[in-house]
RNA sequence: UGGGAAGUCGUCCAAUGGCAGGACACACGGCUCUGGACCGUGGAAUCGGGGUUCGAGUCCCUGCUUCCCAGCCA
């Protein structure tokens, strides 16, 4: 992976984005002796998705480019929601994406002792107080966007009393919710985050790492800022919604007397067209059974994308391409699909397979005969070598590759037409049969004996090249054809996002694929020529019972032409 | 209607007072034993109104639009 690309994609010598520019400026000013340290701070309460990938690529990328460090740090300050299972899944996802924490993964809970000390310092300095108000009372006295809040009647407790109460909170003397530690800031601040925010609350819940050691837990603003400080994080990169929290972030560090001062910089989170990325909605899809799980190949989760066959390098490339800025935006899925195809085109080996088989009989080929044809494993990469594909009299081709009366610009098989069978022969269509229901059941052709290997002896031009499989050699394979999960560019724009679900986001077919498909290992990625990119399902694929997931289709000029014609026709006035 | 932030091709990102550029998408053409890939060409934008300046996407004023904030979530 080349971090350089992220640093300077234009080759202009200028930093690629405003964050890298800010970091470069900090280094130039000699701050932190030029050291750069970042962190990726997920909460272990769900699965990582493509939006997190943007943050991962940014944080680890910036660190790498500057010879710095990047900690994977779990923000585990809310034991009610967090679980070890998510810690493990996140670790796996980060590793799969190609990144390693500098040193061991950290946890906010690693810092609970020091965080507690900082809290006492705050109290001793008169910057925090224990409040006996209930959650409802605190809400009621917070004021509104336009009106100031009121000071709590406990706001001016003496330091000694605060200290005593806080220690007793820590000792477990009070029930959940009885008291909180609040920052003594400004109940009239126009920034609601600064109206004496809560720093610690009582929760007698077992924590997945610290067990029952703590009856109190710090809240995000306090824990995050000081964890950054403790770990020596120079640049704390987060999303836009924390912009309003920055004064609090800075306050926590300054008021606690922490000696290391990190800098928070906010950037716009990633939004992707035809996709939802909120934890709540993703969870809803899983809980309501609209997908098979967090790793359903239609999910934008790292686990889902892995199962979909999307290579980590494609995700990294995509994240670098979308850039980093402060503007709210929705990235076109086409850009993501481009990154996927770009990577897969260069790296995946080719196989032939037929999704919707129609029998093709080569009339002048002996019934018992068979032969092997050499075909390139990857035309983009000569070093990938060749494979051998069996040919015989009875083949399968795709139904879409034959038409009885073809329209203009249809270059495939039709009565009297000559086409090439990829890597094998030139054949001319001699006829076809229909079944009782009118469906084409068999197509017949004759091959040109001088065209062995697929080239015309006289150099005549043959426009169409078809993929095929030998009927008696082909392996029958379950193929899951995945399509985008939503029909709307911004699901839920005009109501319930579930109404925008694509009813055809998964179609399963029995395909016929050349024998080599049997050698695929789970997770193996291939291109089915002229069809698309596929992965042997990492979970369910067995060599004796192959299961392929479609990662993405190939770009298809013919399909686009058809679509355009249809659109055009429907626009002819008076036709309705 | 308080505070914070953001408005540049269809989309995403650049342009740090000096020719508005790149990528994706789209269109057209070339090439091709994948209608893929690749190559070429083209259309396509500075939110509106004022101002400063030789010169404004960039600076100033003003208006508009969008996003974020009233968790003891992160």
Image: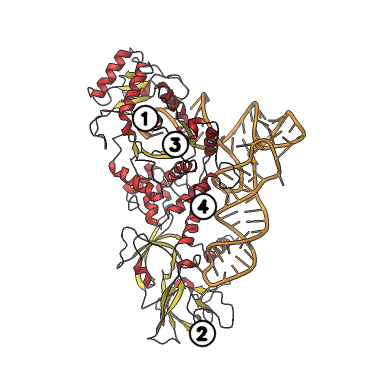
Q: Are marks 3 and 1 on the same chain?
A: yes
Quickly name the residue at label 4.
Answer: A335
Name which quarter of the figure residue B70 lies in: top left
Residue A484 quadrant: bottom left
Reading the image, the residue beneath label 2 is A448
In space, the residues marked 2 and 4 are separated at their CA atoms by 43 Å
Name the chain under label 2. Answer: A
Residue placed under numbered mark 3 in the picture? A37
Viewer-side residue, B5 vs A136: B5
Question: What residue sits right under mark 1 in the picture?
Answer: A223
Of callouts 1 and 2, which one flags the residue occurring earlier in the amino acid sequence? Answer: 1
User: What distance separates the C-alpha of mark 4 from that of mark 3?
Assistant: 30 Å
CA neighbours of label 2 inside 10 A, class few (<14), some (14 to 19), many (20+): some
Residue A219: x %, y % from top left: 35, 29
Q: Nearer the viewer, residue A392 or A452?
A: A452
| Dot placed on the residue nearer the N-terminal end, 2 or 3 | 3
Position of A153 relative to A22 (above/below): above
Horizontal and vertical percent position of residue B30: 64, 68
For the C terminus of chain A, give its image quadrant.
bottom right
From where the camera sits, is residue A458 visible? yes
Quote the CA–CA distance across marks 3 and 1.
18 Å
| In this view, the mark in front (4 or 3) | 3
Q: Is residue A77 visible?
A: no
Horizontally, residue B21 falls left or right of residue A32, namely right
Relative horizontal placement of residue A333, taking residue A542 as reference (left or right) = right
**What residue lies at 30% left-to-right and 67% top-to-bottom?**
A545
Q: Residues within 10 Å of mark 3 (few under 14, many from 20)?
A: many
Disc 1 is placed on an element classified as helix
- Check the residue under mark 3 and report the chain it is in: A
Chain under label 1? A
Q: Are marks 1 and 2 in contact (CB under 8 Å)?
A: no
């Amino acid at each position: 992976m080349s971090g350089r690309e992220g640093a300077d994609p234009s080759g202009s010598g200028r930093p690629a984005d405003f964050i890298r520019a800010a970091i470069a400026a900090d280094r130039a000013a000699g701050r932190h002796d030029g050291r750069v340290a970042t962190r990726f701070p997920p909460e272990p309460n769900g699965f990582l998705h493509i939006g997190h990938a943007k943050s991962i690529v940014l944080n680890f990328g910036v660190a790498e480019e500057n010879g710095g460090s990047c900690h994977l740090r779990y923000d585990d300050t809310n034991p009610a929601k967090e679980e070890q299972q998510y810690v493990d899944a996140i670790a796996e996802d980060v590793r799969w994406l190609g990144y390693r924490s500098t040193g061991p993964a950290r946890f906010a809970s690693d810092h609970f002792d020091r965080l507690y000390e900082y809290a006492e310092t705050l109290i001793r300095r008169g910057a925090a107080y224990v409040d006996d108000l209930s959650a409802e009372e605190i809400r009621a006295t917070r004021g509104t966007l336009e009106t100031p809040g009121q000071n709590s009647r406990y706001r001016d407790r003496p330091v000694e009393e605060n200290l005593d109460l806080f220690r007793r909170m820590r000792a477990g003397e009070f029930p959940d919710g009885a008291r909180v530690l609040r920052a003594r800031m400004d109940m009239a601040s126009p920034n609601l985050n600064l109206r004496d925010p809560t720093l610690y609350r009582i929760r007698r819940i077992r924590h997945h790492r610290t067990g029952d050691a703590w009856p109190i837990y710090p809240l995000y603003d306090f824990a995050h800022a000081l964890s950054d400080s403790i770990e020596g994080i120079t640049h704390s990169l987060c999303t836009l919604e924390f912009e309003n929290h920055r004064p609090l972030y800075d306050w926590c560090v300054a008021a606690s007397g922490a000696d290391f001062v990190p800098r928070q910089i906010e950037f716009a989170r990633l939004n992707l067209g035809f996709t939802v990325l909120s934890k709540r909605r993703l969870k809803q899809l899983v809980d309501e059974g609209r997908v098979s799980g967090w790793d359903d190949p239609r999910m934008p989760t790292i686990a889902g994308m892995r199962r979909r066959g999307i290579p980590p390098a494609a995700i990294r490339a995509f994240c670098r391409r979308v850039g980093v800025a402060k503007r709210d935006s929705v990235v076109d899925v086409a850009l993501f699909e481009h990154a996927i195809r770009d990577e897969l085109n260069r790296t995946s080996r080719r196989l032939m397979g037929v999704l919707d088989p129609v029998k093709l009989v080569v009339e002048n080929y002996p019934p018992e005969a068979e032969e092997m044809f050499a075909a390139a494993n990857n035309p983009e990469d000569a070093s990938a070598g060749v494979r051998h594909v069996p040919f015989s009299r009875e083949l399968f081709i795709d139904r879409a590759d034959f038409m009885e009366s073809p329209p203009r610009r249809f270059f495939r098989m039709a009565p009297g037409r000559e086409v090439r069978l990829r890597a094998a022969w030139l054949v001319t269509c001699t006829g076809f049969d229909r079944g009782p229901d009118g469906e084409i059941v068999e197509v017949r052709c004759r091959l040109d004996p001088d065209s062995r290997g697929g080239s015309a002896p006289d150099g005549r031009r043959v426009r169409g090249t078809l993929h095929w499989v030998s009927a008696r050699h082909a392996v029958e394979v379950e193929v899951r054809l995945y399509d985008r999960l939503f029909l709307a560019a911004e699901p839920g724009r005009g109501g319930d996002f579930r109404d925008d679900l694509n009813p055809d986001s998964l179609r399963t077919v029995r395909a016929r694929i050349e024998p080599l498909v049997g050698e695929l290992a789970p997770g193996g990625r291939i291109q089915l020529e002229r069809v698309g990119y596929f992965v042997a399902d990492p979970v369910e694929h067995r060599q004796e019972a192959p299961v392929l997931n479609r990662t993405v289709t190939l770009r298809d000029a013919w399909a686009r032409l058809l679509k355009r014609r249809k659109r055009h026709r429907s626009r002819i006035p008076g036709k309705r």
